Image (cartoon, rainbow, N blue to C red):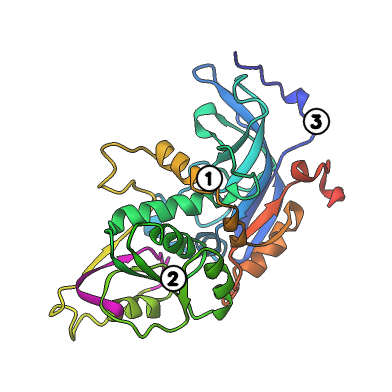
Amino acid sequence: MTQRFDQRDSAEVPRAFWVTAPATGEIRPAELAEPGDDQPWVEVETLYTGVSRGTESLVYLGKIPASEYQRMRAPFQMGEFPFPVCYGYANVGRVIRGPEHLCGREVFTLFPHQTRFRVPAGAVHPLPAGVTAGRAVLAANMETAVNGLWDASPRVGDRIAVIGCGVVGTLVAYLASRIPGTQVTAIDTDAGRLPLLDSLGVRFVTRCHDKDFDLVIHVSGHPDGLRTAMDLAGREARIVEMSWYGDQEVTLPLGGAFHARRLKLCSSQVGTVSPAQAPRWDYGRRLQLALSLLADPALDGLISGESPFDDLPRAMARLSQAGSGELCHRIIYPAATGATGPESN
């Protein structure tokens, strides 16, 4: 049975983070969606959100091309690109009202940075056993990594290079290294990534002298990384581009040996389930798989920083700066700490 929703039961006004202009954000009061009678709804109090630095920095800086405004919409985005917009998709919370089988459960939702919200019950994904709420903020990144590997179709025994060891790149290398017989090399110019990749059992280098890889996956977000990918790929090898550049143009050396070596360059985008899986998989099943793959405590190493919700405007300003070496930045909400309001932080 679904519990009744009553705004009077929740005295504290929900709050959400909005991007209001280029490199400008603020926390505003939020309204809760009115639950309909046609389907069960849940009310969730947020425990943690994760900042997806690559995409959210482009949103924060106003670098989403006008042609992509609709395709780039997050599932529960509020407002419109370019501004003002409430954007995000890595929310972990606790169900406080809704169907009995969900009440009290910790859930992941593709919802922005907001202290409390209501969505249809089918939009929340209960956390599997062994996956902590704090680690579950990585679910959207893991889902992107899963979809990227589906598009890449790695084979048993492949020599695989992963260029770019941000959160998604590290997860791609982590998953690929667990395919029998594969030899995975993770590449990033930041030598500080070594301890994390080492803890995950993945070979890491800052400069790769090997060539002739069977599969090269590019996730650095920098055009130079894609050029390196083309240089490392062996004859008739596959290159999968997982980076998204926003409004930045990219030039590639498609002369030289590109055609003679018959290289294959393809894109991967998490907004569409990989065609190879689409006949059998939907978004919900893919996300539940991603959550289940977060059971390894070693993945906590991807959380490189955290700050309270009320500090999010300042945190986004810092995280969006070029050269930030942070991986997943976790936002902690009052419900996770037992605090009752902004003054508690």
Q: Can you identify the residue that label 2 sits on?
A: 221
If you read the primary sequence from the N terminus, does the residue marked by circle 1 or circle 3 appear first? 3
- Check disc 2 and report its element: helix, strand or loop: loop
- Magenta region, residue range: 232-248
Q: Please tell me the numbered disc located at residue 11.
A: 3
Q: Quadrant of residue 23?
A: bottom right
CA gap, disc 1 and disc 2: 24 Å
Q: Residue at x 68, y 41 (%)?
A: 46
Q: Which residue is mark 1?
A: 77
In the image, is residue 236 part of the stretch drawn in magenta?
yes
Q: Crowding at label 3, few (<14), some or many (≥20) Cα neighbours within 10 Å?
A: few
The single residue placed furthest to the front in the displayed view is 181
Q: Secondary structure at mark 3?
A: loop
Residue 245: horizontal and vertical position, in percent?
A: 41, 68
Q: Quadrant of the N terminus?
A: top right
Q: Nearer the viewer, mark 2 or mark 3?
A: 2
- Indicate which disc, 1 or 2, sits on the residue closer to the N terminus: 1
**Which one is earlier in the sequence, the residue at label 2 or at label 3?**
3
Q: CA distance from mark 2 to mark 3?
A: 43 Å
Q: Can residue 72 be seen by looking at this rendering?
A: no
Residue 42 place in picture, x, y as percent: 60, 27
- Say what amino acid the circle numbered 2 marks: Gly
